[in-house]
């Protein structure tokens, strides 16, 4: 079915037990402590498009990325891959092959003891895609060329490459199993801007050439604007606003989305005085009652303290905000 | 045109790292000045030498790095050849330092109040009681709520953003005339980043403190700095008033760097990118270090190394502007 | 192969080796000890175990350079008329064999369990680490003595003599594995959270395969250091056990046995019988330890 989303999260949640060891807990007389990294997220990634998640550290975006490829199992709710349960899909290697991930840290994402050609060929070998060694080598060379490296680079070790080149190797590894769905967890945030532009261009190019579906995680709104079709803004484990990219930037609705945009330094030097949002992100172990953003929100009212807002349609977007719903924005 | 005597003057600074494979030149012929009350932004990609310039000024070059040539003058007095003890005194009193990770600056075993008070009593002629009073004042000034109660807290009891505020208070409390801030906001979330930048800017303005702000974030520079130095491969590529560098960059590298920053206000199909990567220190090309990546390189660029020359409103180390200095001069 | 060699001689480890005179001397001393021990049957001037060639008339000959010394016995002879130099070479052979085997055993066991504990975590990790904790509270020599005592009591003498060597190896090895397990567990927990391991997990590479081909090669650096340092320790443990008379059987004297035998004659003037094996033991252990120290510094990027 063409309109089954590539990835769908249905009220998915992921909690981490961050309790102290049993003995200490008994002595201090405290209960278990749960960190609600992701707390009820629903979204769908359309085939061939890019769905991005933005938010500050601790908002749960990286946890969503790991839920999406099955590195974590959801504590509640469902994660569906191409219409079926993810855990079930991952049990079959021909389904697992269809999803891949690109990581943030180009220095930690490649095994330092392996040669580049073995790193890139790992998925090919794991899935038994090309049994013949010569064919594997040819494929690795092709992949290296595709990501803008030389086939001769295959015999080198990761430490011989710069950060940007390593990220290209990561992409080549991800592409080697001919995936359809790529989860990209902050793929450019460890890179310098000029290199970031190279990688973003490469990723866009590969997407249009191969029809890839991206789940793109970033904290950088400007980067997200360049690559996304749809954007979810996350705050403290929940989605605050989910909107088509252009709409989100043209008309940010959620007060948090507006605060985020307001916070970005102005490169155009219009000299406009920015009013930075006050306060800090609260702890996901003890989130505020009601709407998690209410202690920092200029529009907060009594209802925001008491009742947690659900995602509701507002124009072409979905917004979880009482003020927006009530037209107080 | 010559302004009053600059507070900090760096002349032809050269930093070398002797290694087993020969001596690496990490900084080469770096010259600039900072006047009282002025914020000089230093930008560049990782490995360009921006942090090392800061480290050389505060006398904390990591061994085996050493200043091989040139001089650093603070208020007309040489500080690059001081003994460790003398330099340490200057570091607290005349130069304040702010680093990316606040935990490296704060001593986890002492309360923030004690650290602030000790810094002040060491460098200023005041009594401990007076120091404590001032410490509360500083915490209040950097925006720590309920400063009088928080003064006896330990660093780990503060959140990341609050800790960085404490570090800023610590750097400023002995009323230094120069602050060297190395990526002060990089470890922080965007919304906190904006608060810290606003704080630094207003404090520097109020107290008339000169600041060297090292960062890779052009947005931060555009908002905070008066002048900006763009570094590439251990040299200054371009230096000038921030408006000119950001809006009408002269050096092809600055042009490329500015172009590769993804814009927030629009979506572009393909970001401008600089191909290749900055050379490693062990393989800096002959002539202009940027020549292999430069779209405008010509014969001379591969032969001679350009010095900073006046070009328009800024100074650029680029042969394209070799003639201009004379006509303008 | 030539490529690997070329990379080795180009590496920082080799470079730091050439820069450290103490390390070079240690390596030479260790090499002499090892070669002398390994090739003892071919290069030793006498065979100390050939009873036919022993002559009590040759007993208590002092070293060759003293007045009463004989050229044939460079380091003198003991109470049985055995050549001390040859006995040392044969003894070092036993010491080295026990030390290496015990270290290999401890390394294999410790690395395997540490890898499992660190990668799988949970209850297995808790169990293994508590065992480590308990074992680390006993001095290793005590553990070795205990095992040796139990085996001695449980088995008849002739059987015991046959397997005594293995008992010592086992006893020393089992008392040293927790060090390896703890280190490997720690590094494994760091590595398993690194993104290259996650990348392998996304592909669906099986846990045993991830442990062996991804994690193991990246945690071996510190293991090599501990193993080297542990080799010196194991040789010493064996010498202590043998000195106390509960180590290797008398038919296969190690350096420790030689020191014990010679100890009886120390105060009657025949100092060479115990001093030379003692010096050899010190030289061997010290050089191995210095090599281990250097290796630790050379593999630690922070100190470079």
Image (cartoon, coloured by chain):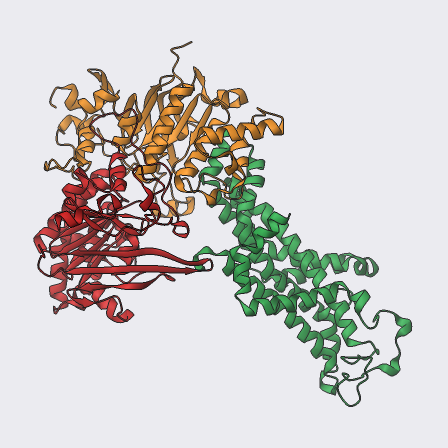
Res A282 visible: no
Q: Quadrant of residue B195?
A: top left
Chain letter for orange, please: A
- Where in the figure is residue C254, as x and y percent of width and height? 74, 67
Q: Quadrant of the C terminus of chain A?
A: top left
Which residue occupies the extreme right position in the image?
A: C52
Chain C on-screen colour: green
Query: Which residue is rendered at x = 28% and y = 71% of the image?
Result: B83
Res B281 visible: yes
Does residue C60 lie above or below A248 as drawn? Answer: below
Of residues C215 and B266, the one nearer the viewer is B266
Query: Which residue is rendered at x = 78% and y = 90% of the image?
Result: C67
How many numbered markers are drawn?
A: 0
- Where in the figure is residue B247, as x and y percent of width and height? 17, 37
Q: In the figure, is residue B166 to the left or right of C238?
A: left
Q: In the figure, is residue A191 to the left or right of C17?
A: left
- Where in the figure is residue C268, as x and y percent of width and height? 74, 87
Of residues A134 and A292, the one nearer the viewer is A134
Which residue occupies the extreme bottom position in the image?
A: C67
- Where in the figure is residue C62, as x and y percent of width and height? 77, 84
Q: Quadrant of residue A227?
A: top left
Chain B on-screen colour: red
Q: Quadrant of the N terminus of chain A?
A: top left
Query: Which residue is rendered at x = 28% and y = 27% of the image?
Result: A226
Q: In the figure, is residue C97 to the left or right of C12?
A: right
């Amino acid at each position: 079915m063409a309109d089954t989303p590539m990835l769908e999260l249905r009220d998915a949640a992921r909690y981490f037990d961050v309790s102290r060891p049993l003995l200490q807990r008994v002595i201090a007389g405290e209960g278990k402590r749960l960190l609600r990294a992701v707390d009820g997220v629903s979204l769908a990634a359309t085939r061939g498009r890019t769905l991005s998640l933005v938010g500050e550290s601790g908002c749960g975006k990286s946890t969503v990325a790991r839920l999406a490829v099955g590195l974590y199992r959801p504590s509640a709710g469902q994660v569906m891959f191409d219409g079926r349960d993810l855990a079930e899909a991952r049990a079959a290697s021909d389904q697992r092959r269809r999803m891949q991930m690109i990581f943030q840290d180009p220095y930690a994402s490649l095994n330092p003891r392996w040669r580049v050609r073995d790193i890139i060929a790992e998925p090919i070998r794991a899935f038994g895609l090309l049994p013949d060694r010569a064919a594997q080598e040819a494929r690795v060379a092709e992949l290296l060329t595709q990501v803008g490296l030389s086939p001769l680079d295959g015999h080198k070790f990761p430490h011989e490459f710069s950060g940007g080149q390593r990220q290209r190797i990561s992409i080549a590894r991800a592409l080697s199993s001919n995936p359809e769905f790529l989860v990209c967890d902050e793929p450019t945030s460890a890179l310098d801007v000029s290199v970031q532009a190279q990688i973003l261009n490469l990723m866009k190019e590969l997407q249009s050439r191969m029809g890839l579906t991206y789940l793109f995680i970033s904290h950088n709104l400007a980067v997200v604007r360049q690559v996304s079709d749809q954007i979810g803004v996350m705050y403290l484990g929940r989605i605050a606003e989910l909107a088509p990219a252009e709409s989100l930037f043209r008309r940010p609705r959620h007060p948090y989305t507006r605060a985020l945009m307001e916070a970005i330094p102005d490169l155009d030097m219009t000299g406009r005085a920015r009013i930075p949002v006050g306060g800090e992100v609260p702890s996901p172990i003890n989130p505020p009652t009601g709407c998690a953003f209410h202690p920092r929100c200029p529009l907060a009212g009594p209802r925001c303290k008491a009742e947690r807002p659900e995602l509701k349609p507002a124009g072409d977007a979905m917004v979880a905000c009482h003020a927006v719903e009530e037209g107080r924005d | 045109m010559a302004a009053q005597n600059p507070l900090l003057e760096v002349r032809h600074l050269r930093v070398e790292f002797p290694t087993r494979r020969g001596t690496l030149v990490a900084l080469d012929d770096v010259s600039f000045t900072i006047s009282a009350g002025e914020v000089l932004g230093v930008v560049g990609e990782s490995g360009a030498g921006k942090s090392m310039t800061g480290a050389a000024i505060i006398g904390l070059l990591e061994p085996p790095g050493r200043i091989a040539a040139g001089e650093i003058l603070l208020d007309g007095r040489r500080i690059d050849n001081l003994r460790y003890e003398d330099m340490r005194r200057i570091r607290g009193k005349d130069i304040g330092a702010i680093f990316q990770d606040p935990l490296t600056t704060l001593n986890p075993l002492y309360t923030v109040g004690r650290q602030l008070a000790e810094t002040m009593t060491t460098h200023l002629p005041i009594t401990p009681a007076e120091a404590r009073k001032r410490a509360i004042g500083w915490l209040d000034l950097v925006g720590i709520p309920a400063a009088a109660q928080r003064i006896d807290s330990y660093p780990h009891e503060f959140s990341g953003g609050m800790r960085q505020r404490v570090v800023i208070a610590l750097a400023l409390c002995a009323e230094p005339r120069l602050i060297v801030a190395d990526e002060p906001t990089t470890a922080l979330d965007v919304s906190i980043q904006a608060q810290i930048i606003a704080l630094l800017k207003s404090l520097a303005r109020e107290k008339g403190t000169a600041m060297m702000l090292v960062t890779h974030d052009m947005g931060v520079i555009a908002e905070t700095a008066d002048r900006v130095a763009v570094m590439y491969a251990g040299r200054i590529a371009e230096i000038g008033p921030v408006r000119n560098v950001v809006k009408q960059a002269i050096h092809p590298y600055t042009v490329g760097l500015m172009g590769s920053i993804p814009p927030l206000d629009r979506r572009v199909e393909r970001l401008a990118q600089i191909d290749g990567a900055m050379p490693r220190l062990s393989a800096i090309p002959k002539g202009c270090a940027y020549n292999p990546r430069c779209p405008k390189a010509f014969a001379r660029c591969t032969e001679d190394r350009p010095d900073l020359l006046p070009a328009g409103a800024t100074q650029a180390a680029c042969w394209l502007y070799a003639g201009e200095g004379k006509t303008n001069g | 192969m030539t490529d690997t060699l070329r990379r080795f001689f180009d590496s920082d480890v080799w470079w730091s080796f050439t820069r450290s005179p103490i390390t070079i001397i240690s390596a030479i001393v260790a090499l002499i000890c090892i070669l002398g021990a390994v090739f003892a049957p071919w290069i030793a001037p006498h065979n100390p175990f050939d009873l036919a060639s022993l002559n009590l008339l040759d007993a208590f000959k002092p070293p060759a350079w003293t007045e009463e010394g004989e050229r044939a016995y460079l380091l003198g002879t003991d109470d049985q008329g055995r050549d001390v130099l040859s006995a040392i070479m044969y003894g070092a052979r036993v010491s080295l064999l026990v030390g290496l085997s015990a270290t290999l055993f401890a390394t294999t066991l410790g690395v395997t369990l540490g890898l499992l504990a660190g990668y799988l975590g949970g209850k297995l990790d808790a169990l293994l680490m508590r065992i480590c904790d308990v074992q680390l509270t006993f001095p290793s020599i005590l553990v070795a003595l205990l095992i040796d005592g139990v085996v001695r009591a449980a088995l008849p003498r002739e059987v015991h003599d046959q397997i005594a060597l293995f008992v010592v190896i086992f006893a020393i090895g089992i008392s040293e594995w927790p060090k390896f397990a703890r280190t490997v567990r720690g590094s494994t927990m760091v590595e398993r959270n690194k993104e290259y391991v996650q990348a392998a997990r996304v592909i669906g590479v099986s846990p045993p395969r991830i442990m062996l081909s991804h994690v193991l090669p990246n945690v071996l650096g510190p293991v090599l250091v501990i193993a080297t340092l542990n080799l010196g320790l194991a040789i010493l443990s064996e010498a202590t056990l043998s000195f106390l008379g509960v180590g290797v059987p008398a038919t296969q004297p190690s350096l420790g046995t030689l020191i014990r035998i010679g100890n009886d004659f120390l105060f009657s003037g025949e100092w060479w019988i115990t001093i030379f094996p003692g010096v050899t033991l010190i030289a061997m252990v010290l050089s191995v330890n210095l090599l281990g120290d250097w290796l630790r510094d050379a593999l630690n990027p922070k100190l470079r």
